[in-house]
Amino acid sequence: MKTILVTGGAGFIGSAFVRRTVEKYPDTTIVVLDKLTYAGNLDNLLPVHDAPNYHFERGDIAHRQTVQQIIERYGVEAIVNFAAETHVDRSILEPDAFIQTDVVGLYVLLDAARQMGVQRVHHVSTDEVYGSVAEGFFREGDVLEPNSPYAASKAGGEMMVRAYHVTYGLHTTVTRGSNTFGPYQYPEKLAPFFITEALDDRPLPLYGDGMQVRDWLYVDDHCDAIDAVLHRGAPGAIYNIGGEHELHNIEVTRFILRTLGKPESLIRHVADRPGHDRRYALTNDKIRAELSWTPQHTFEEAMVATVRWYQANEWWWRKIKTGEYLEYYKRQYAERLAGAGG
Ligand code: NAD
Ligand code: TYD
């Protein structure tokens, strides 16, 4: 592939993918298309800023003309779509942008790819499309029962990917990754939020009893799996990407606090998230068997490295935790923390 368009490449996982791909494939041109929403951040791409095979374009995947012009100008052969609204709590407060980007935007991207003969489209989806599972593990053929507006919009987008493959023969692949953590993650998701709050000795608002289970995947492993599927995945196929490390939220929180040398008294049990999925769990059987991919990092080693990164890179996250971020924090947490006596 001579030219890959990475949409949403200024976000957390997309930028990790770009940083790795620019270095791993020096003969491939990587073009990032990103709207730079509150979650998009050009600081994430500073390490590749001067690389000759990297280009950045600001724009919206839902804007057909923009997408078509970029495909034409750069001769795009493959698209990897990370662009999305991604935070469950924000989707509960305001679902509009989720439907606009995660469903309509993805449709525009697929349609432009079809019309302009793009050879491959890889779509980055999430384990949340399955809904919650009390026991056992989700497989790729399982029914989708999304529970939050975020999960529903991602599931809707996936249906459109399927239709473009079946109807038009577009070479598509989809991955459903589990909860991802690592450097450069916007500090609204559990790990970076709690790490940066704890660094300032602020209360950590744990929803409900904290016994919800998530499967934790290091960002480098997530990117390696996407790379494998992009290059070797079967047309029309869907692959789970699990971290193979299930933990209760309270265990993750305690691990972060221990790593930072901070007390557990910072934890506040606050009012739960509405519709909160109790457990996500995936099997990696398919991606292991077909593409020989397995996670290479242990949770412990990767989370310690992540915590150390936030400790060493205050320049990156302190400037984010201002302005719009504080407005969102107030909306999401002020009442909850007051109710918890925090
Ligand atoms: P993120 O919120 O950090 O980044 C999203 C990026 O998309 C931002 O740079 C944003 O500016 C850009 N964007 C948003 N709307 C856009 C639009 N209309 N046009 C162009 N760009 C737009 O997200 P992330 O955590 O890096 O997630 C990336 C992808 O991976 C998403 O599709 C998400 O659903 C999926 N995913 C995330 C996780 C996770 O735990 N973070 C797990 C599984 C799957
Ligand atoms: P999050 O990082 O938002 O990812 P997702 O909802 O996509 O799994 O949350 C991970 C888990 O942590 C989830 O069960 C909700 C919980 N959580 C809290 O308890 N408090 C918080 O402030 C946040 C952001 C999440």
Image (cartoon, rainbow, N blue to C red):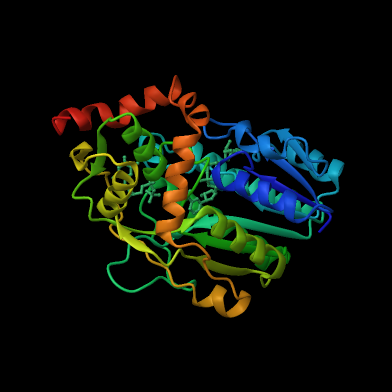
- Taking depth in this image into account, of 241 and 311 the one nearest to the observer is 311
| Residue at the image point whose x is 31% and y is 35% from the top | 198
* Residue furthest front in the image: 261
Residue 263 is left or right of residue 33, and the answer is left
Q: Is residue 117 above or below residue 57?
A: below
Locate the C terminus and report the quarter of the image it occupies: top left
Q: Is residue 295 above or below residue 36?
A: below
Percent position of residue 97, x then y: 50, 36
| Residue at the image point whose x is 61% and y is 56% from the top | 123
* Residue furthest bottom in the image: 289
Percent position of residue 54, x then y: 77, 42
Residue 38: in sight, yes or no? yes
- Taking depth in this image into account, of 120 and 280 the one nearest to the observer is 280
Percent position of residue 3, x then y: 81, 51
Residue 43 is left or right of residue 308, and the answer is right
| Residue at the image point whose x is 44% and y is 21% from the top | 322
